[in-house]
Image: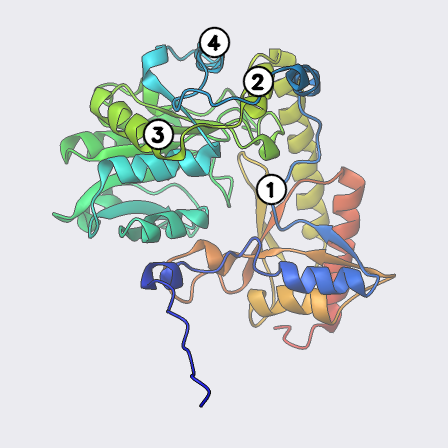
Amino acid sequence: MVQRTVAPHVSTRAQAIPPSPIRGLVPLADAAKARGIRVIHLNIGQPDLPPPPGVSAAIAAAASQRPTYTPSRGIPDLIAAWVRYYQRVGLSINPEEVVVTGGASEALWLAILATTDPGDQVLVPEPFYAPYQGILTAAGVELVPVPSPDRYGPISPEAVRPRISPRTRGILLCSPSNPTGTLYDRAAFQALAEVAIAYNLFFYSDETYRELVFSGARAPSALEMPGLDGHAIVIDSISKRFNACGLRIGALISRNRDVIAAAASLAELRLSLPLVAQLAAMAALDAPESYIVEVVTTYRRRRDTMLAALRQIPGVRPIPPAGALYLVAELPVDDAERFAAWLLTDFALGGETVMVAPLSGFYATPGCGQQAIRLALVESEAVLEHAASLLAAALEVYPGRRA
């Protein structure tokens, strides 16, 4: 008799994590490439710009070092480099207020685990960076979306207060934001910070795109808001401003000693971060100000180029971003996720197509973002213009086009 075996089920926690709108269509893109189609990737914020010159040199120099364990909070020299970087942007922090992390994602993961319990809630402006939903879900925390009054702009305290409950533990804000490039000026930022203070909430501030602002100075920081020291947890990363995503180095910064102690204890569970990546990150953080200025100038040109190109396409409504490196566009289609898949399975012009991220995956509210996409400005101006022309051609023949 043949004995039948049934494999154990995976966890309900894992099953509850939503698919990535950024990477979910990768199998379709791989299949298109296998058919000989060139895919222009505007679906993911993988910068095409080079990192600061010192990064490559640091990686080469690291070859002579033994690949040992390092302190769980990060090597002291890298923590010092974070402190120097913050000083250069006008923010004062101390080394003991820093935990080096595996990118901004781990920084948020540590922050959530350090400050919430299963069943708690975190308020998040919608649309939001898609992995927020997965990180909170995996921690057993409910993401409570706060819709913008005009779909994409900054939320107000008036929108936040009615959604605060006894289970609410914090507000999570990203400015400039991914996916919309929405920027909170100092007044809007401080107004939300005051809500966190009034209701004794944590204020998780994702400042990954801090300097990527297209008009004026850098974005406001939670570290400079009056009275917020005990509430503020800053999430940071070298991935975008220094074009070093693959190093996977970020930081959690807080003046709340209990938060830092809890995050440091949690960081010990993954022992340490790769030594080579930490040494390279030091070089990135010490890059001259002129490097960041050029990065911002490049993305500003790309934004303007893509806005102009998309505005020429009938029925397309691009939303001008104030910062970051993305652009949202509303399309005359039945369903943007279906359109994004169709671009990879059924469309090509001259052997080329475009990969985009459906905006619906950046929402928790069902039915939102179904006619919009996010485009990452991670190609040259010429390639972006060409990608826009491919989108225009695709919309002319897409079966689900709306008038």
Along the viewing direction, whichever of 265 and 29 lies nearer the viewer: 265
In the rendering, which numbered label is found on residue 45? 1
In the rendering, which numbered label is found on residue 57? none
Q: Which residue occupies 37% across, 69% down? A: 9
Q: Which of marks 2 and 4 is nearer the N terminus?
A: 4
Q: Which residue occupies 60% across, 12% down? A: 289
Reading the image, the residue beneath label 2 is: 279
Q: What residue type is labelled 1?
A: Gly
Instruction: State the image quarter where residue 298 is shown.
Output: top right
Between the C-alphas of marks 2 and 4, the distance is: 15 Å
Q: Position of residue 311 (x, y in %)?
A: 67, 51
Q: Which amino acid does label 3 sit on?
A: Glu
Instruction: Locate residue 90 relative to residue 57 in the image: left or right.
Output: left
Q: Which of marks 2 and 3 is nearer the N terminus?
A: 3
For this orientation, the residue located farthest to the left is 166
Assign the C terminus to one quadrant of the image: bottom right
Reading the image, the residue beneath label 4 is: 84
